[in-house]
Image: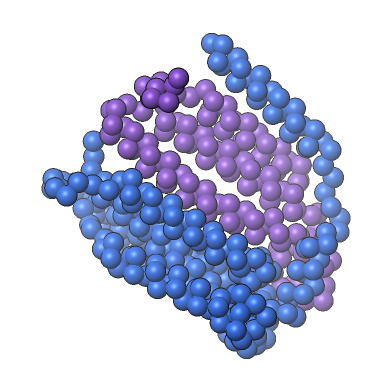
Chain colours: A blue, B purple
Amino acid sequence: MIKRFIAVVLLAAFAAVFATLLFGYTPDTELNLTARYYAERTAADLGAANIVTAIVVTYRGLDTLGEVTVLFLAASIVGLVLAQDTHKTPRARVPVGELLTTGTRFLVPLILLLGVYVFVNGHLTPGGGFQGGAIIASGILLTLLADPLKHFGHGLISAIESVAGIFYVAIGLAGLLLAGGFLDNRILPLGNVGELFSAGAIPVIYSLIGLKVGAEFASILASLSDTEEL
Amino acid sequence: MAHLAMATGFLLILIGAYGALTQRNLLRMIIAFTIADSGVNLVIVAVGYMRGRTAPIIDNAVSAAAAVQRIIDPVPQALVLTAIVIGVGVTALMLAYAYRLYAQKRSLDIRDFTELKG
């Protein structure tokens, strides 16, 4: 009881802080200095139509590399923590139903296609590697739901993941040699803003991020699915 | 509009914090953390919102020259994009640990895990 009281007091203090923030908040009417720079320069300097993508992939590309590393680390630790003993008790096959099986066969290719579309068009539309990767992983999740015993090759997943990671860093280093700095997208021609083949290396980098994120989420899902029931 | 979204975000943070502090079941605590996570994301996105402006994408509706007057702040959106992905990774990690703890003690009640108590 006393613990609950302390929790409520703590939350009341939080709520007071939040209320001050909320009532003292006046929305900006003009972009601040950083946002203004991005809004003015993205199209001219980087050729990307989606400014958020330009920030994530190029202006703050190093952070994104770090973020993908964090995700990789999380996926590895999930795999490590859930690692099973070598002896595997075969699980009984649970019938999942005609609707789910047929629906999966029909939907999974479309979901994968949508995922690829989303990350290939990341520099033009509200989308990108993280969103596309998550969509691809949702396709994998559907396959696992339809066939819980399906065993995804961890080898294939980690191969995709590693190759995408290596190319990501290699493109970053190419930017260091050929353009203005690490992960500079101007190693490829910028093209016209709004076209698919534009914005230099951004579509390439975001596609690699999409594959990497998709593979990482898929590896988390495969680890969770391989885990035996207790 | 921004105030409404921000108030919702703060409310979600409070609900999440309350759940994390009072619940004893590990899975419920994990869900509480994800609720608080969504609240934080909502608040950050709400900070970038500006009345009468549109998404930070240059197309037929927003020319590159008019972008400064027409778009909302893209930086919070980039931040939240990062935060969402990391949030998923962290949730998966918490669930894996919860599985491991359950395998050890056959219990998800936080009161059964007393090894770190002095």
Q: Where is residue A209 in the image (x, y as percent from the top left)?
A: 49, 68
Rendered view: A5 above or below A70: above
> Is A109 in front, or is B107?
B107
Rendered view: B74 above or below B26: below
Residue at x-position 22% and y-position 57%: A150
Rendered view: A131 above or below B34: below
> Is A72 in front, or is A101?
A72
Q: Where is residue A214 in the image (x, y as percent from the top left)?
A: 42, 63
Residue at x-position 32% and y-position 37%: B100
Residue at x-position 65% and y-position 23%: A10
Q: Where is residue A187 in the image (x, y as percent from the top left)?
A: 60, 85
Residue A138 quadrant: bottom left
Residue at x-position 43% and y-position 52%: A74
Q: Where is residue A21 in the image (x, y as percent from the top left)?
A: 78, 37
Rendered view: B93 above or below A168: above
Quarter of the figure that contains the C terminus of chain B:
top left
In this view, the residue farthest toward the top is A1
Q: Can residue A142 be seen in this view?
A: no
- How many numbered discs? 0
Residue A20 relative to residue A190: left or right: right
In this view, the residue farthest toward the front is B118
Residue A43 relative to residue A95: left or right: right
Residue B113 relative to residue B59: left or right: left
> Is B116 in front, or is A104?
B116
